[in-house]
Image: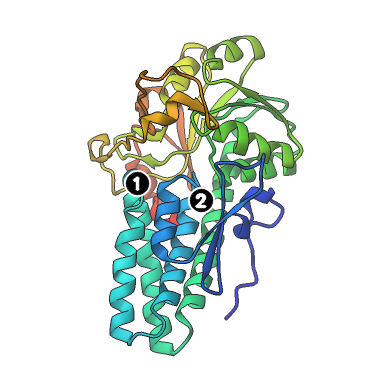
């Protein structure tokens, strides 16, 4: 059955499913977020290995890799379509491992996505349906569920922002940015946003700010060393960010720089609200592997070298923000203390699982 409901309706260009990653006729097209919005270009992948490499190379970021992973599994099904059923399942299981481990910090989430695609493939094989199209439909349904869950999060987040308030963001929270603005508009709230640029890939400047602008909001980009000054001088009311993982001990894994913005917010008495769902796969911060990326990227800005030859770079992709700096974890079940995240599960929440599958 073809999916008709689309939870991306009314969101910015960048958040439309086809503009994140899309499988069709033996290819996966991924919007190259490394150059958007200066250029609107797509990277075309013709093997699932190329999809995994694109994820590794940061062609897509934030929640984009989850959609790309699912579409990569559809491509893997196309690659092995002439094989026997047993051979197809073995090929897809191997593809699952390849794509899941494209980025170590989010490997647990990626595994959930790919495992769901593998189950969709098994069902399609039993029913005699084209496996690649079945996985793509599964991916769209998963996106619909994730976007809808994020919309529920936005409904709890927006009341925490005062009317006419000023919000500081961090990096690119993907769907929650669009849903937050959509809900703010429905509530009749005009908000002003400040987006730190988020070096070295400039996701805040290029992605978050573009989504805010496309949806008609007042948005200003600042450099990564300005948050404290802006908080003091511009009357920031709320600092909010998404998370790559929310550990059950209350530590939040997010783009490097989140920790220092939360410190600044705490200093000025500004609440920090983290959006997402607790991840049962990370009971403590000690289960998190912080991805160390190519340090050369810190020595340049959008391909232009800024440091002298021989100078060394250092590039941790994420950092850990401790729970005492977090005012609340905003979930699809309400707002929870970072010190009491088990209550989220006792309230019926499914955790990070529902955010990606």
Where, by quadrant of the figure, is residue 320 drawn?
A: top left
Q: Position of residue 160 (x, y in %)?
A: 59, 31
For image coordinates 50% across by 66% down, the residue present is: 139
User: 199 and 261: which one is in front?
Assistant: 199
For image coordinates 53% across by 53% down, the residue present is: 149
Q: Are marks 2 and 1 in contact (CB under 8 Å)?
A: no
Looking at this view, name the residue that lies furthest to the front.
309
Image quarter where the N terminus lies is bottom right
Residue on which disc 1 sits: 279
* Placement of 87 over or under 147, stated as above or below: below
User: 331 and 318: which one is in front?
Assistant: 318
Does residue 298 appear in the picture of this structure? yes
Q: Residues within 10 Å of mark 1 (few under 14, many from 20)?
A: many
* Placement of 141 over or under 314, stated as above or below: below
Q: Position of residue 71 (x, y in %)?
A: 48, 64
Q: Position of residue 299 (x, y in %)?
A: 44, 24
Q: In the image, which is nearer the foreground, mark 2 or mark 1?
A: 2
Q: Position of residue 225 (x, y in %)?
A: 52, 16
Looking at this view, name the residue that lies furthest to the bottom.
128
User: 45 and 142: which one is in front?
Assistant: 45
Residue on which disc 2 sits: 64
């Amino acid at each position: 059955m073809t999916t008709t409901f689309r939870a991306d309706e009314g969101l910015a260009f960048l958040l439309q499913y086809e503009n994140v990653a899309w499988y069709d006729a033996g290819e996966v097209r991924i919007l190259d977020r490394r150059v958007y919005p200066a250029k609107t270009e797509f990277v075309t992948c013709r093997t699932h290995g190329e999809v995994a490499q694109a994820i590794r190379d940061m062609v897509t970021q934030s929640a984009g890799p989850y959609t790309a992973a699912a579409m990569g599994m559809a491509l893997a099904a196309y690659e092995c379509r002439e094989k026997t059923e047993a051979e197809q399942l073995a090929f897809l299981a191997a593809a699952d491992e390849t794509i899941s481990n494209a980025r170590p910090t989010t490997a647990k989430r990626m595994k959930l996505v790919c495992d769901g695609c593998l189950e969709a493939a098994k069902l399609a094989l039993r029913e005699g349906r084209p496996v690649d199209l079945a996985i793509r439909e599964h991916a769209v349904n998963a996106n619909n569920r994730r976007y809808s869950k994020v919309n529920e999060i936005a409904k709890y987040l927006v009341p925490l922002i005062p009317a006419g308030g000023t919000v500081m963001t961090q990096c690119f929270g993907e769907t929650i940015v669009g849903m937050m603005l959509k809900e703010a508009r429905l509530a009749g709230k005009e908000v002003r946003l400040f987006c730190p640029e988020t070096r070295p890939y400039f996701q805040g400047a290029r992605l978050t700010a573009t989504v805010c602008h496309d949806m008609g909001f007042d948005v200003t980009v600042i450099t990564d060393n300005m948050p404290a000054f802006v908080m003091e001088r511009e009357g920031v009311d709320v600092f909010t960010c998404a998370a790559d993982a929310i550990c059950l001990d209350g530590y939040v894994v997010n783009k490097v720089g989140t920790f220092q913005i939360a410190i600044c917010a705490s200093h000025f008495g500004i609440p920090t609200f983290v959006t997402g769902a607790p991840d049962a796969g990370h009971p403590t911060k000690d289960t998190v592997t912080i991805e160390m990326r190519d340090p050369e990227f810190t020595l340049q800005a959008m391909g232009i070298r800024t440091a002298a030859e021989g100078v060394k770079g250092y590039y941790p992709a994420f950092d850990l923000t401790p729970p005492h700096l977090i005012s609340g974890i905003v979930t699809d079940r309400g707002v929870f203390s970072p010190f009491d995240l088990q209550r989220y599960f006792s309230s019926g929440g499914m955790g990070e699982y529902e955010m990606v599958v």
